[in-house]
């Protein structure tokens, strides 16, 4: 018998089974069922359809690419089934591993998203080419695509309707508190990790530079402006001492200060900027989390007494978390 | 980087700060290119005089481990990598001395005589 090692803080098995069932239902069964329904409906009206269906090369474009009728009927459910099996299986495997819940949600959302795209890109033009044209069927295809998009969004939005799919995922559990004597004085400091941010900035700058005559569109302007603002704010300097935690960018403002008496505890969590916080920079996420997100990976999460959590992607966050917990313990012992 | 000092320790405070930085380099929490905390921040956190912090930084500069620049503060130099390499060799030496039954005092004297 093979015994798979599971991390100590992993969810109980019955909870994992329930999450697995939900992921399979939303990420695999629902999109495949939608596609099979659409395929069956299309197959039922084949006498009214031409032998070759013309499809657009992108959503909304004029149909110019020919595809055999049965290929157009069978291709979408088969592709959706294969992709959804792969992504959902990967997401289910991730559930029991040491990864961010954002990754799990992101993976599982690909199946419904693909179903929505195929409904709009293949079945909608197919039904529009039926002669005589069926009644409200185009509307139903759009409604089905909308339903698939909602499923995808439910998986993507942190704290959405399937919030039960998400769970706090500490990287290695709460770090042990650093043992400090009453006479010890401490200082810990580090900078935020900014590798991702740097690449985002460089890519945005390259895209902007490649625009003809720098004729900056509204979107490019906003993207560039945001990237510059975020890049200026990074890196942040984080320090911990007997007074508490302080985080500030190199330009000095804005800064966050959390005295020890406002902190409940600290831990290291693993985050993904896009799915967990919707991007980089100063961000607000689900479960009352906010903070400075400059890269994916381990991050220092400081749980405040107010119920909010300050998250910052600082290097050596494990030492910071254990120091904060150690200082808290020493404070409690001193009060006793 | 974690810097701890203890007022009950016999060593002077500046030496404790410098020793904490050296330990950080050897354990890998402080790396080449890392910025050291400013003297103002460090003296506030550790509740020591600013001159104590500056004394520690000057000591580390003399050892080649940090570079002090006006307006840019203290930065860890490439010498930190050499210290890491040396610490591996020192660990091996200490292990071997222990296996051979040579006391730390004799080993220390041998090292001093060899480097003299």
Image (cartoon, coloured by chain):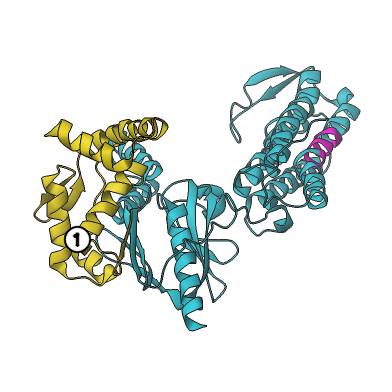
| Chain shaded cyan | A
Query: Residue A229 placed where, x, y %?
Result: 31, 55
* Residue under numbered circle 1: B14
Query: Residue B14 placed where, x, y %?
Result: 19, 60
Residue A7 shown left or right of residue B50 in the figure? right
Q: Hue of chain B?
A: yellow
Query: Residue A150 placed where, x, y %?
Result: 70, 50
The answer for which chain carries disc 1 is B
Q: Residue B30: tell me if it is visible.
A: no
Query: Residue B35 placed where, x, y %?
Result: 24, 50
Q: Which residues are magenta?
A: A29-37
Residue A335 shown left or right of residue A114 in the figure? left
Q: Secondary structure at mark 1?
A: helix
Residue A34 among magenta residues: yes
Residue A169 shown left or right of residue A200 in the figure? right
Q: Nearer the viewer, residue A43 or A54?
A: A43
């Amino acid at each position: 018998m093979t015994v798979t090692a599971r991390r100590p803080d992993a969810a109980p098995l019955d909870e994992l089974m329930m999450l697995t069932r939900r992921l399979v239902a939303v990420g695999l069964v629902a999109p495949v069922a939608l596609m099979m329904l659409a395929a069956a409906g299309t197959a039922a009206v084949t006498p009214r359809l031409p032998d070759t269906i013309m499809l657009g090369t992108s959503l909304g474009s004029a149909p110019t690419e020919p595809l055999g009728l049965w290929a157009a009927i069978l291709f979408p459910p088969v592709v959706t089934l294969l992709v959804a099996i792969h992504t959902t299986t990967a997401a289910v495997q991730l559930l029991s591993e040491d990864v961010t819940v954002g990754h799990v949600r992101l993976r599982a959302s690909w199946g419904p998203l693909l179903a929505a795209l195929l409904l709009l890109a293949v079945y909608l033009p197919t039904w529009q080419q039926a002669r005589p044209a069926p009644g409200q069927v185009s509307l139903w295809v759009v409604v089905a695509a909308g339903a698939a998009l909602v499923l995808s969004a439910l998986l993507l939005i942190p704290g959405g309707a399937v919030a039960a799919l998400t769970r706090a995922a500490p990287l290695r559990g709460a770090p042990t508190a650093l043992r400090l004597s009453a006479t010890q004085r401490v200082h810990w400091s580090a900078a935020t990790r900014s590798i991702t941010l740097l690449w985002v900035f460089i890519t945005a700058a390259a895209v902007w530079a490649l625009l003809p005559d720098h004729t900056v569109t509204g979107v490019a302007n906003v993207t560039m402006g945001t990237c510059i603002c975020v890049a200026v704010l990074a890196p942040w300097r984080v320090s911990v001492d007997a007074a508490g935690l302080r985080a500030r960018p190199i330009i000095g403002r804005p800064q966050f200060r959390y005295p020890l008496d406002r902190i409940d505890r600290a831990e290291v969590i693993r985050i993904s900027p896009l799915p967990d916080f919707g991007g980089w920079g100063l961000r607000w996420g689900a479960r009352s989390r906010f903070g400075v997100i400059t890269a994916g990976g381990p991050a220092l999460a400081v749980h405040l007494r107010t119920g909010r959590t300050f998250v910052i992607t600082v290097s050596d966050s494990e030492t910071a978390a254990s120091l904060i917990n150690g200082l808290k313990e020493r404070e409690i012992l001193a009060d006793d | 980087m974690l810097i701890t000092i203890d007022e009950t320790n016999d060593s002077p405070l500046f030496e404790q700060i410098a020793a904490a930085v050296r330990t950080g380099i050897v354990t890998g929490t402080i790396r080449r290119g890392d910025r050291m905390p400013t003297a103002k921040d460090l003296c506030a956190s550790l509740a020591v005089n600013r001159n104590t912090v500056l004394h520690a930084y000057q000591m580390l500069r003399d050892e080649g481990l940090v570079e002090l620049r006006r307006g840019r503060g203290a930065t860890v130099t490439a010498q930190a990598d050499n210290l890491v390499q040396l610490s591996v060799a020192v660990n091996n030496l200490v292990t071997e001395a222990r296996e051979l039954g040579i006391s730390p005092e004799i080993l220390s004297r041998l090292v001093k005589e060899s480097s003299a």
